[in-house]
C-alpha cells in the first residue's frame, strides 16, 4: 500500500491511496499524521485504519505531481515537532564513496581514520542477533520540518554554500504514540541533499554540511521493506541527463540492520515525545560528487525506485540572504 498527501483544488489537505494512475481519497482524513495517531490509539494497523475509513475516486496522480500539489507523505502541523535526522556509513559501498569525497590532491584527510573505523564497526557488529544491541552508527541532525520541501520543488541553497549535492536514500517515517512508543508508519524515497565541499574541507564540518534543505516522497510505502532494492539516481541539466548511476539499498546492501539503526536513534528519551514525527535518512553509497560532478542552479535531481512508485524529483534554487554579521542584538 502506498499513500500520498496532497492539496485539492480548494487548497485543502487530503490523504490519497495510489492505485495506478489514479488517487483514491481517504474519507474524513486531512493528514497522514492524524491517520497514524488514530490507528495507534485504536490499536489497529495503518492498513486496517485505511480500510475502515474507506475511499472515494480522486484526482489524476500525474496531474497532481505536475501541478506541485503533492506534499511530503508524512509531516506535522507544527514543523518544530518534526525531527529530520540520519545515519551515515551504513551501506556496503559507503566507505568507498566517502573515501573518494575526502581525498584532496591524492592525500586522505586525517579524519578518514575515524571514518573507516566506524565503517568497520558496522561491518563487524551492525547486524546483531535479534534482541541484541549492535554497533552504534554515525548519526547526524538536519533540522526540523521547516527544512523540508515538497516533491517537485527546488531546494533553497544559501549563498554561503559551497556545494549542492544529492544523496539518494531511503527514509524511515515515524510517529510517537501517546505512550512514548515509536511507531514506523512506513518508508519513502529521500534526497538528503548536503554540502559535500564543506564536508571535504574537514570531517568535523560534517554537522555544518548537513544543515540544508531536503525532500522525501512522494509516496509512503506501508509494510515491510524488501531486502534488496536497486534504484537510479540521475541529474538533468537543460533537459539532458548529465549523470546517472544505480544505487542499492535494503538490508542485503547494508552493514547495519534497520532495527539497529532505529534502536540507536530512539534510545534517546528526547526523541520519544508523544505526537512527534521523525524522518530518518538511512544513508547511501552513491554520490555524483564522488564522480566529480558540480551541480548548478537549474539542475534537476531524479531518484527512482520501482517499489516506491513515482520518482522523487527536485531542483536547485536560491535561498534568502542569511542574517548579516553583527546583527545579533543584546537585550
Image (spheres, grey):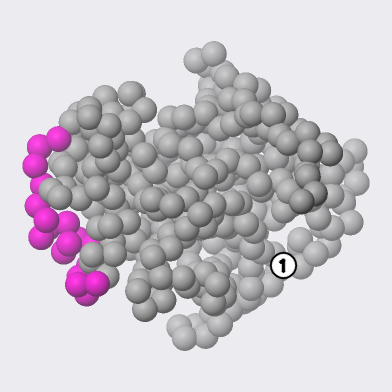
Residue 66, given in percent of the width and then of the height, sits at 33, 23
Residue drawn at 33 percent across, 23 percent down? 67
Residue drawn at 27 percent across, 32 percent down? 11
Residue extending farthest top: 238
Residue 282, given in percent of the width and then of the height, sits at 53, 57
Between residues 320 and 259, which one lies in front from this camera angle? 320
Residue 93, given in percent of the width and then of the height, sits at 63, 53
Q: Is residue 130 magenta?
A: no
Q: Is residue 44 magenta?
A: yes
Residue drawn at 25 percent across, 37 percent down? 12
Residue drawn at 80 percent across, 49 percent down? 330
Determine the image quadrant of residue 46.
Answer: bottom left
Residue extending farthest bottom: 131
Q: Can you identify the residue that label 1 sits on?
A: 118
User: How dense is the environment of label 1, judged by Cα within 10 Å: few (below 14), some, or many (20 and up)?
Assistant: many
* Residue 33 shown left or right of residue 251 in the figure: left
* Residue 161 shown left or right of residue 110 in the figure: left
Residue 275, given in percent of the width and then of the height, sits at 39, 65
Element under label 1? helix
Q: Is residue 100 above or below residue 225?
A: above
Note whether residue 115 is visible.
yes
Determine the image quadrant of residue 6.
Answer: top left
Between residues 328 and 208, which one lies in front from this camera angle? 328
Q: Which residues are magenta?
A: 41-58
Amino acid at each position: 500500500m502506498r499513500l500520498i498527501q496532497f492539496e485539492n483544488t480548494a487548497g485543502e489537505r487530503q490523504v490519497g491511496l495510489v492505485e495506478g494512475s489514479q488517487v483514491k481519497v481517504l474519507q474524513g482524513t486531512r493528514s497522514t499524521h492524524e491517520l497514524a495517531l488514530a490507528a495507534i490509539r485504536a490499536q489497529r494497523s495503518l492498513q486496517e485504519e485505511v480500510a475502515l475509513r474507506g475511499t472515494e475516486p480522486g484526482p489524476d496522480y500525474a496531474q497532481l505531481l505536475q501541478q506541485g500539489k503533492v506534499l511530503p507523505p508524512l509531516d506535522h502541523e507544527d514543523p518544530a515537532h518534526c525531527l529530520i535526522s540520519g545515519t551515515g556509513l551504513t551501506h556496503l559501498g559507503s566507505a568507498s564513496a566517502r573515501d573518494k569525497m575526502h581525498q584532496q590532491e591524492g592525500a586522505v584527510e586525517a579524519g578518514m581514520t575515524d571514518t573507516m573505523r566506524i565503517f568497520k564497526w558496522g561491518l563487524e557488529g551492525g547486524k546483531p542477533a535479534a534482541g541484541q544491541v549492535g554497533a552504534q552508527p554515525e548519526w547526524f541532525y538536519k533540522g526540523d520540518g521547516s527544512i523540508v520541501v515538497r516533491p517537485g520543488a527546488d531546494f533553497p541553497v544559501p549563498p554561503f554554500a559551497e556545494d549542492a549535492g544529492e544523496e539518494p536514500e531511503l527514509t524511515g517515517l515515524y510517529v510517537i504514540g501517546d505512550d512514548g512508543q515509536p511507531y514506523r508508519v512506513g518508508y519513502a524515497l529521500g534526497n538528503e541533499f548536503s554540502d559535500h565541499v564543506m564536508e571535504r574541507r574537514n570531517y568535523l564540518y560534517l554537522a555544518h554540511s548537513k544543515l540544508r534543505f531536503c525532500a522525501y516522497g512522494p509516496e509512503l510505502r506501508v509494510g515491510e521493506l524488501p531486502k534488496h532494492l536497486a534504484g537510479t539516481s540521475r541529474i538533468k541539466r537543460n533537459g539532458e541527463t548529465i549523470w546517472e548511476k544505480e544505487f542499492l539499498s535494503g538490508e542485503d546492501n547494508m552493514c547495519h540492520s534497520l532495527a539497529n539503526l532505529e534502536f540507536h536513534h530512539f534510545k534517546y528519551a528526547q526523541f520519544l515525545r508523544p505526537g512527534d514525527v521523525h524522518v530518518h535518512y538511512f544513508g547511501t553509497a552513491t554520490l555524483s560528487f564522488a564522480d566529480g560532478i558540480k551541480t548548478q542552479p537549474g539542475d534537476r535531481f531524479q531518484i527512482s525506485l520501482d517499489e516506491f512508485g513515482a520518482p522523487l524529483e527536485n531542483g536547485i534554487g536560491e535561498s534568502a540572504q542569511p542574517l548579516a554579521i553583527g546583527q545579533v542584538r543584546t537585550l
